[in-house]
Image: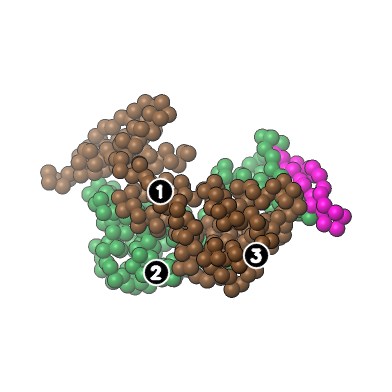
Chain colours: A brown, B green
Amino acid sequence: MSDLRILARHLGHRFRDESLVIQALTHRSASSRNNERLEFLGDALLGVVIAEVLWQRFPDASEGDLSRLRASLVNKEMLARLARDLTLGDYLVLGPGEQRTGGHQRDSILADALEAIFAAVYLDADFHTVRQVILGIFEAALAETRDDQVDKDPKTRLQERLQAKRRPLPEYEVLGVDGSQHAQVFHVRCRLPDDDREVHGDGTSRRRAEQAAAESMLERLDDDD
Amino acid sequence: MSDLRILARHLGHRFRDESLVIQALTHRSASSRNNERLEFLGDALLGVVIAEVLWQRFPDASEGDLSRLRASLVNKEMLARLARDLTLGDYLVLGPGEQRTGGHQRDSILADALEAIFAAVYLDADFHTVRQVILGIFEAALAETRDDQVDKDPKTRLQERLQAKRRPLPEYEVLGVDGSQHAQVFHVRCRLPDDDREVHGDGTSRRRAEQAAAESMLERLDDDD
């Protein structure tokens, strides 16, 4: 294993308890004291830190936009890329089978180890520290993050998404209008004609109700993917 | 809306910025300044706080066990139940359609508002504070959390899970053995005969390799669910 002090410098955190970072670097093929449980905690820490930074940075993004943006940053390929930037492969502790078959450079092993390191930093220090470490590692990736989808309204996004799959356009229908004349609420149904799926949306205008229904339908389609 | 000071007392956090908690209580049917984005952040905060407490409390639980335990605590039904304990329905800000159709007591609306409140606490204070608030609210549910599955080994759990679905038992086969006589690594395949799915596992004994393969298969089945 390479010198852990160099890794500490790259991370921006010097471990008080080095056994934590060693466990984070240990694959299950090498020891029963491995990084699988740490990875579970690290994945959750990464999720919340990236959620917060996106929440702050994209004040107009919907919940669905934020989920999509996070998924573009938190995934195996991105984590493996960032792990390679840290030369994490040089520090991994692998069993003989994984060593022989190139485990040091395997995306899933690198990604899991990086997540486990986030948990190790948190346990060694605190939330503030792991937040700084994660933001440092993701700085360039975050700077590249633009969302072309953010500025588009839900009806446009739904239409583009269905067209990309050569599916027919959604149908909107006003089911009813509630409230007094100056506080009306429109109830709209959005239906996909090719699979009979439908969702409803409410809004203070027909247009707003249609946008709400389109947003619900986008979330439904997200669940399918 | 009921007195926010009473809610603050139940939560164990008095908001400096009350507009945050009001936004957290506001459903999308009532205003464009609603709780949907806060819910995204709150869900991530809840995920990490529960991940950590389970990680600490179940030192022998595998990553898969921890995921299952968390899913048993973090779900719409549990969140709605806890929201009802806080009488959150009395504070919700809903549009007229949702008011009329009982939105104050709908599980999904209550669950989303509670998650949004976690984000509001975090933004109003810090991670330490929201962690205390979440642990307070989940105290009884956490105390009830036992995992009967934790103590069972992966082969037993896989067998029970397949039997529950009336599926045939998995087949294990040693594919090879690596390493010197005193540092052997066994490579085992686990196969489901009814759908030809297979995964591999390594271990320092045949039994350990089979357990590793069974654990992988359980994770694969989790992904399906």
* Image quarter of residue B10: bottom left
Q: Pointer 1 indicates a residue of which chain? A: A
Question: In this rendering, would B123 be left or right of B191?
Answer: left
Above or below B197: residue A56:
below
Residue pointed to by mark 2 = B126
Is disc 2 placed on a helix, strand or loop? loop
Q: Which mark is residue A145?
A: 1
Above or below A39: residue A100:
above
Determine if residue A111 is in view.
no
Q: Pointer 2 indicates a residue of which chain? A: B
Residue pointed to by mark 3 = A3
Residue furthest to the right in view is: B181
Look at discs 2 and 1 and give the one toward the viewer. 1
Q: Which mark is residue A40?
A: none
Does the magenta segment cover residue B173? yes
Residue B196: image x %, image y %? 69, 35
Is disc 3 placed on a helix, strand or loop? loop
User: Which quarter shows the N terminus of chain A?
Assistant: bottom right
Q: CA distance from mark 1 to mark 3?
A: 33 Å
Count how many numbered circles sit on residues in the image.
3
Q: CA distance from mark 2 to mark 1?
A: 26 Å
Residue A166: image x %, image y %? 41, 26
Q: Which residues are magenta?
A: B169-192
Amino acid type for the residue under numbered disc 1: Thr
Look at discs 1 and 3 and give the one toward the viewer. 3
Residue B111: image x %, image y %? 39, 56
**Is disc 3 on the same chain as disc 1?**
yes
Amino acid type for the residue under numbered disc 3: Asp
Above or below B143: residue B101:
above
